[in-house]
Amino acid sequence: MNAKNKVLISGGAGYIGSHTAVELSEAGYDVVIIDNLTNSEINAIEGVRKITGKDIPFEKVDTCDINELRKVFEKYDFDTVIHFAAYKAVGESMAQPLKYYNNNLISFLNIMELMKEFDRPNILFSSSATVYGEAESLPVTEQSPRQPATSPYGNTKQMCEDILRDSCRAYPGIYGIALRYFNPIGAHPSSLIGELPRGVPNNLVPFITQTAAGIRECLSVFGNDYDTPDGTCLRDYIDIVDLAKAHVAAVRRMTSGDMQEKYEIFNIGTGKPVSVLELLTTFQEVNDIKVPHKMVDRRPGDVPAVWANTDYANHVLGWKAERTLAETLKSSWDWEKKIRKIQ
Ligand code: NAD
Ligand code: WQD
């Protein structure tokens, strides 16, 4: 197989990386995974191998260590890198900004330096809807202005997007795509891989599944006095397998020479706003389980509503979210039951 069909996945033992490794492998790509396992477990690699039936190579490497990373570039002849390796907890980034700037920026700069050094053309970067902040109009398109970041985490996403844009502009051999993910949720239908938050989850769905499993007593719904149909916040929850497939579409675009610009940005969401209460109700109905919950004050920093206009990804990538919210929330609960050994 030639280098065009080989993809290096940094952070590939993580939540989005592991699902992407599966979809890429099933689409016929050869993948190589690197991860330092600071926010993931080796079991995820075993899960990916089990689902695909392939002995996918894995190297335990810290992408901040350029010498270790160089050995990966020397050993494997991939044309494309998908860069997931980053820290992602917004609250922790406020408390420990240097940890976030160090890891998320150095890691990405090292990847970019080596792409240049080894003439590897295609880089796909994991960006986030967080770059839109509190948008002036909804849904947001890729042309909606980015708002000043409200956390060091969000700032690293904006800075990496800028590094990518400038590098694509300056270096003739480098092509970049930034995918701005909305709110990824769910697990692989096999329940062999899924999200593994450490400690108390910050995100809504893992908090719901852990409450359903009896690990948390009660879900706090952060604010029911927003100017939204039921008073709770609106988000665009994107299924993890659909999200993984968006990476396959983006890699295909890069490797087939279809890119119109050297740097392209795509929103990856469903295009449908869902409220916290609507999501909670759907979870309870589809899984036939009650989740204790109470209304509490708004969480500082939350935007009332954000959802994607996905026309560009739908038309240009030929990709569309397919799984329903109910299917996705069933997969979340199946995964939680599997890891907690609940019958
Ligand atoms: P995750 O924490 O599950 O996966 C990230 C992986 O990167 C982990 O396995 C971690 O061990 C690894 N990693 C971190 N620093 C590393 C380093 N220096 N060297 C090697 N490996 C390193 O997170 P995720 O949810 O899969 O997110 C993947 C990417 O998508 C991140 O860049 C994140 O910022 C971005 N993103 C995530 C979300 C979300 O809600 N999950 C939304 C938007 C964007
Ligand atoms: C969703 C909704 C909460 C927990 C975060 C990051 C963002 C991106 C995705 C990486 C909100 C409500 C939550 C709870 C609740 N990550 N909620 N009770 O804040 O939209 O986005 O993850 O790039 O950058 O900020 O996701 O899952 O935390 O919250 O009521 O216990 O659920 O208020 O309305 P968020 P979330």
Image (cartoon, rainbow, N blue to C red):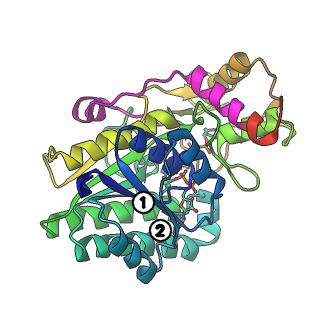
Q: Residue at point 44% right, 23% down?
A: 322
> Is residue 332 within the magenta segment?
yes
| x, y percent for residue 301 | 59, 51
Mark 1 to mark 2 CA distance (whole Å):
8 Å
Question: Going by the image, does 273 lie left or right of 188?
Answer: left
| x, y percent for residue 27 | 36, 38
In the picture of the structure, the residue carrying the numbered disc 2 is: 104
Q: Is mark 2 within 8 Å of ligand 1?
A: yes
- Is 269 situated above or below 58? above
In the picture of the structure, the residue carrying the numbered disc 1 is: 157
| x, y percent for residue 308 | 39, 34
Could you tell me which secondary element the residue under label 2 belongs to?
A: helix
Q: Residue at point 51% right, 73% down?
A: 62
Mark 1 neighbour density, 10 Å: few (under 14) some (14–19) many (20 or more) = many
Location of residue 272 by image quarter: top left
Residue type (three-letter) at the residue carrying disc 2? Asn
Residue type (three-letter) at the residue carrying disc 1? Lys
Question: Going by the image, does 105 lie left or right of 292?
Answer: left
- Closer to us: 277 or 259: 259
**Camera sees residue 85:** no
Judged from the image, the quadrant occupied by ligand 2 is top right
- Closer to us: 175 or 2: 2
> Is residue 118 within the magenta segment?
no
- Closer to us: 83 or 237: 83
Q: Which residues are magenta?
A: 307-335
Q: Furthest residue to the bottom?
A: 67
Q: Is mark 1 within 8 Å of ligand 2?
A: yes
- Is 197 situated above or below 209? below
Location of residue 95 by image quarter: bottom right
Q: Residue at point 34% right, 46% down?
A: 29
Mark 2 neighbour density, 10 Å: few (under 14) some (14–19) many (20 or more) = many
